[in-house]
Structures are given as C-alpha cells and as structure tokens.
Image (spheres, rainbow, N blue to C red):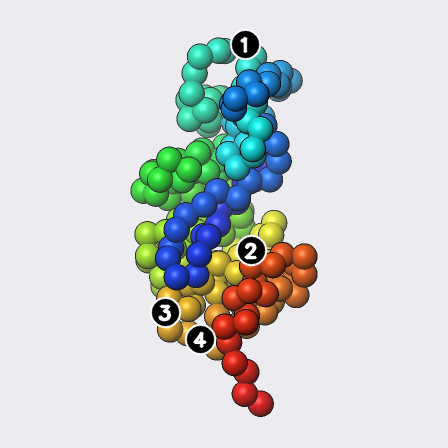
Amino acid sequence: MLIRLCISSHSLATACALILAAGSASAQNNVTFIDGGYAEICEAVAKTLDEPSRQVITGSRLGISPLEVCTLAIEAPENNREQRAGSYNNRAVLKFDLMDFDGALADLDSAIVEQPTLGQAHANRGYVLAAQKRWQDAIAAFDEAFKLGTDEPARVHFNRGIVHEELGHTREAYFDYLKASELAPEWDQPKSELTRFTVRR
C-alpha cells in the first residue's frame, strides 16, 4: 500500500504528511503487533504520521527506527520490485516528515525505477518538488501522476492548483481547485480557495 503527501498552504510551499490510516508512538503508548514482514511494518509506520494517537509497532526486532524498518524492507531479498517500490515510497514519507526533502526525492526516484507506472510515487514527487519550490518540475510530476493514476486525485488537483498559483497561472489554478472540490465535495479547503477567485462570463 502507498502513502501520499501534501502541501498545506497555497501561499507557502509548506510540507505536510497526509496519511492513510491509524497508529504509532504517542502518549497513549499503545502497542500493535504486526503479522508479516518488514514491508508491512514499514507501511504501517508510514501511515501513522498524522494520527493523534500513535502506536508503537513491535515484533521480532525491537529498538530500531522506522527508517531502519523501511530500509530492511527495501533490502529484503524475498521482496519483489513492486514491494520494494512501495517501501521506497513509504520511506520517502518518513523522510518527508523529517523535512529531508532530498532524501525523500531520492527514495521516490528509486521507487519509480523499481515500478515506473507507480502513479502515487509521481504524485509524491510533485509534493516534494513543490516543497522545494521547484514549481515546473512539480507540475510535470503531477501531470505524470494523473496520466498513470493516483489514489487521491482531488488532493493532487488541489496541490497542482497551489503550484499553478505560485507560477501565476490563475486560470489553471482555479480549475484545479474546482476539480478538487468536485471530486471531494466534503473537503472544505478547495472551496475556501475558490472564494478568492472572480469568474467573468
């Protein structure tokens, strides 16, 4: 399974992790036992970054960092290229959370080498490139994500809208925010951005 990232503000390329599901270490100090290999643990850890109740993931190897878990998943000889691509992608999420944008980008590039059609890795590249203010490169990455397919097209449209706005592409930004609003009508942020635009017929 694959994780995605986002940019949180249209005016600043402020990076945020937007995670799929629950768990990792917090004050509640819950413990989750994971059946499966390091790839599954890497995925589970990467999913926990924005959850208010983080859980400690434990198993046969204790006391190693989430990054080390993902590295073990990448290096595990029994994993196929698709699994390695997913683990590179998930390790990129962890690096992004640590604001190691260069490291995250390197892992996403490795994920794409392993699985070139992995649309979510291209979307994540777009988020990292936007965080680095590499606007044109971010647009190209988002476009490739749309071409290949992405897990959350609304969020990719929204973040591409941010980048278009940074580039002064007002019309393109408006239509990306509009599409994000149509795809995720329960999500308030695209609607909020749309209020700043005046449409002349």
Q: Is residue 38 visible?
A: no
Name which residue type carries label 2. Answer: Arg
Find residue 42 and report its horizontal and vertical position in percent.
Answer: 52, 27
Alpha-carbon span between mark 3 and mark 4: 8 Å
Alpha-carbon span between mark 2 and mark 4: 18 Å
Residue 155: mark in rendering: 2
Local crowd size for mark 3, using a 10 Å CA cut-off: few (<14), some (14–19), many (≥20): few
Q: Tag 2, which secondary structure?
A: helix
Point out the frontmost of discs 1 and 2.
2
Residue 76: mark in rendering: none
Can you say whether 130 is above or below 81 in the image?
A: below
Name which residue type carries label 4. Answer: Thr
Q: Which residue is mark 4?
A: 170
Name which residue type carries label 1. Answer: Ser
Residue at 61% x, 32% y: name it: 22
Q: Mark 3 vs mark 1: which is more N-terminal?
A: 1
Can you say whether 133 is above or below 55 in the image?
A: below
Alpha-carbon span between mark 3 and mark 1: 49 Å
Alpha-carbon span between mark 1 and mark 2: 36 Å
Find residue 177 and report its horizontal and vertical position in percent.
Answer: 55, 66
Q: Which residue is mark 1?
A: 60
Q: Mark 3 vs mark 2: which is more N-terminal?
A: 2
Q: Which residue is mark 3?
A: 167
